[in-house]
Image (cartoon, grey):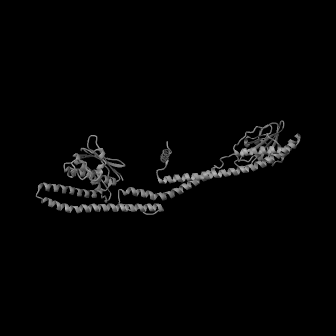
């Protein structure tokens, strides 16, 4: 698979999960941007904080390590029988930062912690003890206060009597980990030193993700989203208004122009739309005036030519001239009918479709046309004359080609569907779109007296689309043409 094809597939898959509205996409961009900025800033801040903390731990652990080395050196220098006396005096005095004891075995410690901070502390202690005392086997471990055991009988730290001066290791409620160093002085003699490294969150790698910071991040995110929604709404509102006006433009060219205000881009777009609407309106009016003028001006010479043709002595020539003039007159009338059919400058009213169909059916029955109507429909908001002209053209076609028409109305919450079926020859499927073009007739005689002007279907579809609906053609399985009209409820 090529990179281009893969990129297209990824874009299509991504488009499925994107919001459909411009407002939704703006909000998504703001959310992603704010979250990305916060995460990036927290990542940078965390890296700097951890680097600063490691420097602090390095300096502090070195100082404590030298203090521990001095303590070990002091106890090494004491005779064995004096060591416990000194320890008792230290406990009675209190206030020391170390808890020191001499045990006959190494006390097991439940070692905790991990990561670069602990590695740095352990390495510093081992390096200092080796350089100062030559000790390579010192054990450097960390323990929670509640798990720490002391003395030969491994008493828990919290169980020792207060006079023993061990409370410097307890900082309730923080409970930081306690550093324990054990090294062997002589056989069956282990020096035990416990102390605290006053560094907050020593082993907490996720301390930056605290509840306070999360709360602040959520507040910032909500504030940005709220302000963004207000700003985006004010920006996208003119675009939504422009979209509605564009949809209504096909139905009514006489809608008032949009108010020209807002940001420069929106203002320029609105001004361009208003100019476009005005130019389209002027062009339509100019076309109507042109067609009306041409048709009107042609009537007078046609009438004069008809009078002169009637005065011809040759009967054959007279009939030919009259037939040609009749065809020309039909074309003129068709042009006028086209202009009138496309002229939808009338107010929208709520009318009863069944009543309009019944009136048209009564008119056609006077000319031996058979029309049957089934179904009911609620009042429909349309332009009355255009709506009647549309149905009249379709029923006349059905009667002319199929002798009878069957009309069925189906009304639901969204649309009114009107189906008109005749019993004529139908239309080849390949020609179903071509018959909507002006002056196109499929009647094989090519006579306009029998085949019409070829404007009725085009006018009807224009009227339906001007009301936001659609007109479709199809052939019935048992013969005849089926015209389906869909009018949306407004």
Q: Residue at x 68, y 51 (%)?
A: 49
Note whether 110 is above or below 351 in the view shown.
above
Residue 399 relative to residue 16: left or right: left
* Picture coordinates of residue 3, whole percent (x, y): 51, 45
Residue 440 relative to residue 2: left or right: left
* Picture coordinates of residue 456, whole percent (x, y): 27, 52
* Picture coordinates of residue 52, whole percent (x, y): 70, 52
Residue nearest the observer in this picture, 281 or 218: 281
Residue 386 relative to residue 91: left or right: left
Q: Residue at x 48, y 58 (%)?
A: 235
Q: Residue 286 sits in which quadrant?
A: bottom left
Note whether 350 is above or below 86 in the view shown.
below
Q: Residue at x 47, y 54 (%)?
A: 22
Q: Is residue 88 visible?
A: no
Q: Is residue 151 visible?
A: yes
Q: Residue 177 sits in which quadrant?
A: top right
Residue nearest the observer in this picture, 311 or 51: 311
């Amino acid at each position: 698979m090529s990179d281009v094809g893969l990129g297209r597939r990824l874009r299509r898959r991504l488009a499925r999960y994107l919001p459909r509205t411009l407002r939704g996409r703006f909000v998504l961009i703001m959310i992603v941007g704010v979250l990305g900025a916060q995460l990036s800033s927290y990542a940078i801040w965390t890296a700097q904080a951890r680097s600063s903390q490691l420097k602090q731990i390095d300096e502090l652990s070195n100082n404590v390590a030298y203090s521990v080395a001095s303590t070990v050196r002091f106890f090494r220098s004491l005779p064995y029988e004096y060591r416990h006396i000194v320890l008792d005096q230290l406990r009675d005095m209190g206030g020391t930062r170390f808890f020191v004891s001499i045990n006959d075995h190494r006390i097991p410690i439940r070692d905790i912690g991990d990561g670069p901070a602990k590695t740095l502390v352990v390495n510093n202690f081992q390096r200092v003890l080796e350089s100062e005392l030559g000790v390579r086997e010192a054990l450097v471990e960390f323990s929670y206060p509640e798990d720490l055991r002391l003395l030969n009988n491994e008493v828990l730290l919290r169980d020792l009597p207060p006079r023993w001066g061990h409370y410097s290791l307890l900082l309730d409620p923080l409970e930081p980990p306690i550093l324990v160093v054990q090294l062997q002085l002589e056989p069956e003699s282990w020096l035990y030193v416990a102390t605290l490294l006053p560094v907050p969150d020593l082993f907490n790698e996720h301390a930056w993700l605290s509840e306070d910071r999360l709360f602040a991040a959520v507040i910032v995110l909500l504030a940005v989203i709220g302000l963004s929604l207000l700003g985006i709404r004010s920006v996208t509102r003119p675009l939504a208004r422009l979209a509605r006006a564009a949809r209504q433009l096909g139905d009514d060219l006489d809608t008032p122009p949009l108010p020209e205000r807002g940001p420069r881009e929106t203002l320029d777009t609105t001004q361009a739309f208003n100019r476009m609407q005005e130019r389209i309106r002027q062009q339509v009016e100019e076309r109507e005036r042109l067609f009306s003028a041409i048709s009107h001006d042609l009537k007078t010479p046609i009438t004069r030519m008809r009078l002169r043709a009637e005065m011809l002595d040759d009967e054959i020539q007279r009939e030919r001239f009259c037939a040609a003039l009749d065809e020309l007159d039909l074309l003129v009338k068709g042009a006028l009918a086209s202009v009138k059919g496309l002229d939808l400058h009338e107010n929208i009213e709520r009318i009863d479709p069944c009543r309009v169909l019944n009136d048209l059916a009564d008119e056609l029955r006077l000319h031996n046309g058979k029309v049957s109507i089934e179904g009911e429909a609620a009042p429909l908001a349309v332009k009355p004359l255009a709506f009647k002209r549309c149905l009249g053209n379709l029923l006349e076609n059905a009667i002319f080609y199929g002798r009878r028409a069957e009309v069925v109305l189906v009304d639901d919450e969204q649309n009114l569907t009107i189906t008109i079926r005749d019993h004529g020859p139908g239309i080849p499927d390949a020609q179903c779109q071509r018959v909507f073009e002006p002056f196109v007739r499929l009647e094989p005689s090519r006579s306009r007296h029998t085949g019409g002007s070829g404007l009725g279907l085009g006018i009807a579809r224009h009227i339906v689309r001007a009301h936001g609906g659609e007109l479709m053609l199809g052939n019935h399985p048992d013969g005849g043409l089926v015209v389906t009209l869909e009018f949306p409820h407004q």
